[in-house]
Structure formats: structure tokens, C-alpha cells
Amino acid sequence: MSSCSAQPVTTAPKAPIKVNGAVISRAMISREVQNHPASSPAAAWKAAALALVIREALGQEVVRLGIEAEPMTDGEGRCETEDEARMRALVERDISVPEPTEEECRRYYERNAGRFRSSDLYEASHILFAARGDDAEAYERARRQAGAAIAELAAAPGRFAELARRHSACPSAELGGKLGQIGRGQTTPLFEKALAAMEPGTIGHEPVETPYGFHIIRLDRAIAGRLLPFELVQERIAAYLGEAVRQRAQAQYVARLLGRARIEGIDLPSPGELNVH
């Protein structure tokens, strides 16, 4: 019988990450990971390491150029550290971001008109037969009750408020089921979809199922959204376009800075993939 000696499997430690010789330690990356939520631990680790590489490269450039700056406070009362202030001043020193022209803002407005419409509004009433999906018996009972109420309303639609007061599990029952005006995002997507498909003055022919149970919906009035005037959204568009240009310029600046630096132990993304804040 032959014998062999098992040799321990060893893996060479990964080369440390360095920026012009300055080491980014694993401990530093471990502390930074919490600031970079990602789809996997590996992705979070890589994002944290890249952030520290960028920070180190900027810090070295700050020292090289002797940049000084006063820390700023944002609208929420958060104050920059001195290092953050100097890095910001460095980037601002070397990046010029022109203000978007009115023509550029108008062009964006015309190409993205759907983004500048006010929400459709609905005046609606409902009767809710509450049910949870994990209670099969109650769920089926609520479905039957909703179907029976719809049949009753088909013969006597004027009894909607009466049935709402008697059966609805929603606080709106006290108002005969009236929900008032409803805008985008104020109800569940299924409820909103049902409203959009209805004609004003009608009662739904089928119960609408949502996580809350089964709804009988009456649409009393629909108010179509309208395109907001350019003058009302021009400032918002200018801010958006200006921020987009600023972020691209920052990413290009950091890419050039990293391109001049001696980076070891990490594969850098392409300039277009750099996420710089």
C-alpha cells in the first residue's frame, strides 16, 4: 500500500493596494465598506477600495499643490472635514462647469416633455372587503362578498354610499367610501391602474385585488395632467443639467489623475464607469 504526504494548500496573499507607494490597507477597506452598499460583498469591497484609491490620489495632489480651503456646511447641517474641503477645492480649481444655456434647457424640456406633466387626478370612492392572502378562508369570503356587492350595485348603483358605510373596512366608509382626489403614487399600483382604465361616472365591473383585499371602485371624476410651463421648470432643468455636466467633468478629472499615478493591486474601471462624489 503506497502512502503520500498531503501538502497544505496555500494561496499567495494578494498584493497590497498602493497609490504612488502609499498603502491602502485591508483594515482601511474594511472600515470603508459600510459606505458602499452593493449586490455582493465582493462588489462592496471593490467599491470601497476604489473610493479609497481616489481619495488617496486626491489627497496627494492637494499636498503637492498646497491647496487650502474652509470646510462648508450643507443644507442639512453636515460639515466637511478639512481634508474633504481641500479635495473639493482641488477639483473646483481644475474643473470649469459652464451654466446650461436657456436654449439647452428648452431643448431638454421639449425632448422630455413627459417628465414635466402634472399628475392625473382622480376623484373616486371605494368599498373595501379586507382580506389577507395568507388566510385562504377569509380571502375567499371577501372575494364572494365583493362579487355580491357588485351585482347589487349593477341593479341599484345609487346605493354605493349605503353599501360603503355598511361593508367597507376603510375609514372612508364614514364618508360613503369617498377618497377625495387621488394623485400618482397615493394608492397601490393595481388600484391606480384600475382607475386609469375607468370612465368617469362608472363603477368597476370586477373587484380590484390589492394587498389590502378586494375593492369596488367608483370613479366620479378624472382630471388629466397637463404639461407644466417651461418657465416653471427651467430652474430645475438647469440644476439637473449642470449637475450632470459637473459629475462627468469630475469623473474625467479623476480618471486623468489616476492615469498619472502609479496604482498597484487594483484594476481601475474605465473613465466612463468612475463614480465620483
Image: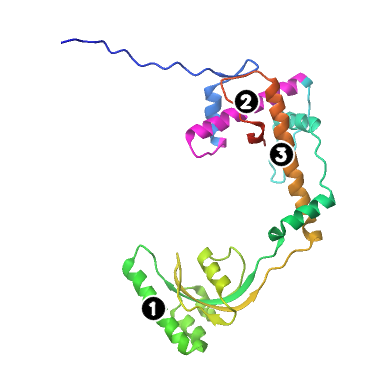
Which residue does the image show at 57% across and 76% down from the upper left? 124
What residue is pinned by disc 2? 53
- Is 272 colored magenta in this rendering? no
For image coordinates 78% across by 50% down, the residue present is: 238
Q: Magenta region: which residues?
A: 35-64
Question: Which residue is disc 3 drawn over?
Answer: 247
Of pointers 2 and 3, the one earlier in the residue sequence: 2
Which amino acid type corresponds to the residue marked 3 in the rendered image?
Gln
As helix, strand or loop, the secondary structure at mark 3 comes to helix
| In the image, farthest residue toward the right | 102
Magenta highlight on residue 48 = yes
Against 221, is 275 above or below? above
Earlier sequence position, callout 1 versus callout 3: 1
Distance between the Cα atoms at labels 1 and 2?
63 Å
- Seen at 78% across and 63% down, the residue is 229
Position in image of residue 136 (x %, y %): 32, 67
Callout 1 amino acid: Gln
Name the spot of residue 52 as percent of width and height, x first. 61, 27
**Pointer 1: what residue?**
145
* Main secondary structure of the magenta stretch: helix
Q: Is residue 208 above or below residue 236?
A: below
Q: Residue 102, labelled with which disc? A: none
Quadrant location of the N terminus in the rendered image = top left
The relative height of residue 81 versus residue 77 in the rendered view (above or below) is: above
